[in-house]
Image (cartoon, rainbow, N blue to C red):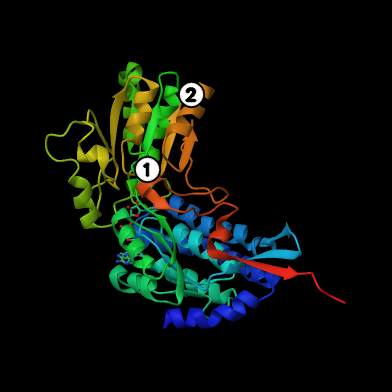
Amino acid sequence: MAIARAAAAFPAWRQMAPADRARLLRRFAEEVDGHLEELARLEVANAGHTISNARWEAGNVRDVLLYYSGAPERLSGRQIPVPGGIDLTFPEPLGVVGVIVPWNFPMPIASWGLAPALAAGNTAVVKPAELTPLTALRLGELALEAGLPEGVLEVVAGRGSVVGWRLVTHPAVRKVCFTGSTEVGKRVMAGCADQVKRLTLELGGKSANIVFADADLGRAAASAPMAAFDNAGQDCCARSRILVQRSVLEEFLALLEPAVLGVRVADPAEESSQMGPLISSSQREKVASYVPEGVPVVIRGQVPAGPGYWFPPTVLAPVPPEDRAMREEIFGPVLVVAGFDEEEDAVRMANDTLYGLSGSIWTENLGRALRVARAVEAGNLSVNSHTSVRYWTPFGGFKQSGLGRELGPDAPDAFTDLKNVFISTEGGS
Ligand code: NAD
């Protein structure tokens, strides 16, 4: 029924004057802005995000809506010079877009799909993750309060294998925007093949934070913990493998220790909390399985007493390259540190993974920074920093971290099909 409502809303939405569609998206952004604190508190209660993160996430939804509200009036197509007439291209909206969202960043990830989709003239059905439906449902209400026509944005909570899979199999859904695990993403991709359905995949990661001996070690060590433990490590971009040039490995670990122990793990509703609990008991069990008795824990932080799926910030070293902790996405506050000798070893180790989502490079040598950035097989790299996802720039993965890109100036193009129309100017009297 939700897909049918979205399909019924599509013709009027695509035909709406671009300036009016833009205005409605801006109103939607204003509505989100007016409810930032409410949305943030909802996410703290539902997902255990720290309040400062949750405020950023709600603000990100507003900013993404505002950014793509500029798109309807700029989707101009092209006029291409050809003999015998005029040739035009039209970026045509696809129809209904299904947006399948994971539990780790419920609000931003929903908006990265729905905002450019709506801006390009599509309607959308958003399916939040089972564990975190509340903010998505509230965003659906705010869209209506902002004046978006009924059916333009539908939000349906439910099981992935039922509601999510229906978005994959329903012929009226013309594109699926999936963010989640690589395992489920592969299934979604195979399902979409049946109807040659357009597809964007944002999947898992095992990103490397490469620290060269010539880096500002103090800054590199001070920033490394939150590059891995933000959102309790439940972050696809977590820099969960730190590769350090061997000549400074000891010094780096000595600097890392106070930084890890300084991460404030506390009730996420407290203003100063930097890390909250994990999402669920099963997630805590999964994370704990990477730290069995006997593994070399070099640094272990504290967690508060009392209820909550807490897991302490944990650093493992040395970990052999074939160890699970070195290869699999842990999705919790566990990072591994390993040494490397030469630049090419760092690149080889960074690329020794099925994934390729993000990563960081710390060096004061500009040539090396560029060389290594070009050699690491990942979609989003930062030098002397750990950038989080920014809506101005394209985001997505190499290898099994994904397919296609979200965000950035070109995102609306991914929600259109190009139509080419040739008009003959020959003949006449
Ligand atoms: P998941 O794959 O279990 O679920 C993701 C979504 O897919 C949920 O809404 C779920 O209900 C739905 N789903 C499950 N089975 C389905 C099916 N058969 N058909 C259609 N939909 C189905 O992932 P998760 O545990 O919610 O999220 C964690 C994963 O997401 C991690 O691997 C993480 O790296 C990844 N992630 C990636 C990015 C990125 O942009 N690359 C961002 C955030 C999270």
Amino acid type of disc 1? Ala
Q: Which residue is mark 1?
A: 238
Pinpoint residue 270: horizontal percent, then vertical percent: 39, 51
Quadrant in the picture for the C terminus: bottom right
Amino acid at dot 2: Arg
| Residue 365 position within the rendered picture, expressed as x and y whole percent measured from the top left | 51, 21
Relative to 392, is 320 on the left or the right?
left
Q: Residue at x 48, y 40 (%)?
A: 387
Q: Which residue carries the number 2 mark?
A: 368
Residue 158 position in % (x across, y down) = 33, 72
Q: Ligand 1 lies in which image quarter?
A: bottom left
Residue at the spot 42% in from the left edge and 47% down from the top edge: 397
* SS label for mark 1: loop
Q: Residues within 10 Å of mark 1 (few under 14, many from 20)?
A: many
Real-space Cα distance between discs 1 and 2? 23 Å
Residue at image position (33%, 47%) is 232
User: Looking at the image, which is closer to me, 1 or 176?
Assistant: 176
Identify which residue, 139 or 178, lies in the foreground: 178
